[in-house]
Image: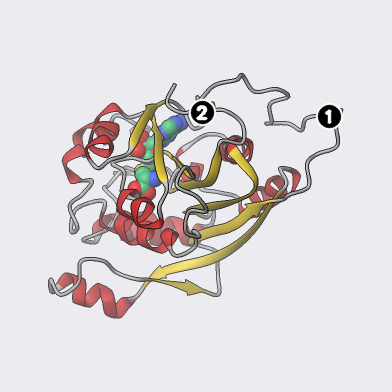
Amino acid sequence: MRLDDPRRNDPAQYDGLADQWWEASGGFAMLHWLAASRAGHIPPAPDPGALLVDLACGGGLMAPHAARLGYRHVGVDLNAAGLAVAARHGVAAVRGSVLAVPLRDGCADVVVAGEVLEHVEDDVAVLAEAARLLRPGGTIVVDAIAATRLAEVVAVRIAERLPGGPPPGIHDPALFVDRRRLLAAADRLDLDLRLVGLRPSLRDVVAWRRGRRDVVRMRELPTTAVLFAGYGRKRDVPRPPGSVPRPGERATAPARTVGE
Ligand SMILES: C[S@@+](CC[C@H](N)C(=O)[O-])C[C@H]1O[C@@H](n2cnc3c(N)ncnc32)[C@H](O)[C@@H]1O
């Protein structure tokens, strides 16, 4: 599919891919690797009621990791077919947009936004929702594709042709993420966020292709110019009362509870 094809990033594509979510060697294989990698940056649940909110949870690939770490796992996604799969894996599925999440402020100990920032028109608005949902001191983990020419070549032109690469047409490079803008927004939103580059372990990829490994480990890279992750926490210091909300933030979020 051409890079400027208007069918790129069409959300309806996920309907036809629902049976692939948990295929270790299917079109979402790399999302399994990223889920395991994210889990390595999430602390064990501080108490039995601790909540992990998974923004754009897809088929719920974080489920085994959230359970092992002791979290209640709420997944938010627009795609009903993916949510049904996630629910079968124990995720409390909430149908909604990551741009206006139907959960209350400060409900989350952990917010994960994996491979979604590069699928929405307003990635900063998703970050603002993550910040709103997090309790002070809570953990945020994101990963996404950078808005660079290199990422366009590697993550679209090359990866779409590789086994374990993304389904062709799933990415629109026009939506890839401006890292500087993301970091500036994180700071405004009281999120301390550190970006690192990621790549799959090449040795593991070979073993995976030979059927000797189910999951490929992700390695850190010195550059964030292709695939990157953001690890951080929400600052404990609350914003001074009466301060003016910043663009993309809500002044007062409606009181809504988990599962609504
Ligand atoms: C590449 S998948 C990532 C799924 C999951 N985070 C993972 O890493 O396995 C992108 C997901 O984002 C969802 N999505 C895209 N735009 C969305 C939006 N505005 N609100 C909620 N979900 C959205 C899609 O339905 C899809 O499930």
Q: Would residue 105 be seen by someone viewing this image from the given angle?
A: yes
- Report the quarter where the N terminus lies: top left
Q: Residue furthest left?
A: 211
* Amino acid type shown at disc 1: Val
The one nearer the camera, 134 or 13, is 134
Circle 2 Cα neighbour tier, 10 Å, few/some/many (<14 / 14–19 / ≥20): many
Q: Residue at x 20, y 66 (%)?
A: 214
Residue 176, image x, y percentages: 50, 47
Q: Would residue 5 be seen by someone viewing this image from the given angle?
A: no
Above or below: residue 141 compared with residue 254: below
Question: Residue 3, which numbered label?
Answer: none
In the figure, is residue 257 to the left or right of 62?
right
Circle 1 Cα neighbour tier, 10 Å, few/some/many (<14 / 14–19 / ≥20): few
Q: Residue furthest front?
A: 48
Quadrant containing ligand 1: top left
**Of callouts 1 and 2, which one flags the residue occurring earlier in the amino acid sequence?**
2
The one nearer the camera, 219 or 120, is 219
Badge 1 element = loop
Residue 154's quadrant in the figure? Answer: bottom left
Residue 188's quadrant in the figure? Answer: top right
* Amino acid type shown at disc 2: Val
Above or below: residue 182 compared with residue 128: below
The one nearer the camera, 20 or 108, is 108
Residue 77, image x, y percentages: 39, 32
Question: Residue 244, which numbered label?
Answer: 1
Q: Count the marks.
A: 2
Q: Residue at x 32, y 39 (%)?
A: 91
Badge 2 element = loop
Residue ID for mark 2: 101
